[in-house]
Amino acid sequence: MKNAAAPVLLDLANEVDFAPSLMARVVLERFLQEKEQAIPTKTLINSMLRDPSQIPDGVLANQVYQCTVNDCCYGPLVDCIKHAIGHEHEVLLREMLLEKNLSFIAEDQLRAKGYDKTPDFILEVPVAVEGHIIHWIESKASFGDESSHQAHLQDQFWSYWNRFGPGLVIYWYGFIEELDCHRERGILLKDCFPTDIVTLRHSTAQC
């Protein structure tokens, strides 16, 4: 009441050890529900979190903004950073494939052909990595912990395996070693671009 710029929501989130962006989402959702007498859509809430100027209350808009820009784990700003890092590593992987003269089809090309779930790159000519045949490569600019990896397996990797055959997942920031347990079933984990790639012509590309 005395100072509209005071970070009330941010301080409250820190006090109860709750992610600021999630605190902002909870309060914003309740505010809109009471104002409109209806449950707001997820699309509307996400849009207002990305652009707080859309929030019809100026004080709340400022509170939400302070929460999102001071959250290092969740929220639209963090999502943008993660997306940028992910894209950077996909570009890096593309350059490595080109450097090794490996023909591939990129994810955007596959989506243009009507595929919904696609890996980042499908190799037009399969290769062998550490004795395992590889048809596709997925780039993950993150650390592969058990929770995230199991989610990726369920939502992505097994779907890729069903459609395109065995493949390689690169966790650029490492992974729990015990998670690399599906090699024989067709999903290989690495934390870098493979040092030895054997093509069908039995030539070896060295990093």
Image (spheres, grey):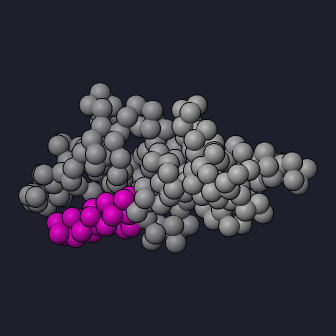
Question: Residue at the spot x=51%, y=56% of the render?
Answer: 69
Let me know if residue 93 is in the magenta part: yes
Question: Residue at the spot x=84%, y=48% of the render?
Answer: 33
Q: Nearer the viewer, residue 180 or 63?
A: 63
Q: Which residues are magenta?
A: 85-106
Observer able to see residue 159? no
| 195 relative position to 187: left or right | left
Let me know if residue 5 is in the magenta part: no
Q: Nearer the viewer, residue 84 or 185?
A: 84
Question: Residue at the spot x=43%, y=45% of the render?
Answer: 157
| 40 relative position to 86: left or right | right
Q: Nearer the viewer, residue 57 or 195?
A: 57
Residue 111 appears at what percent x and percent y?
51, 67
Image position of 174 with respect to 112: above or below: above
Q: Residue furthest top?
A: 178
Residue 186 appears at what percent x and percent y?
34, 40
| 191 relative position to 63: left or right | left
| Res. 179 image quadrant | top left
Question: Residue at the spot x=18%, y=58% of the render?
Answer: 200
The chief SS type of the magenta part is helix
| 163 relative position to 47: left or right | left
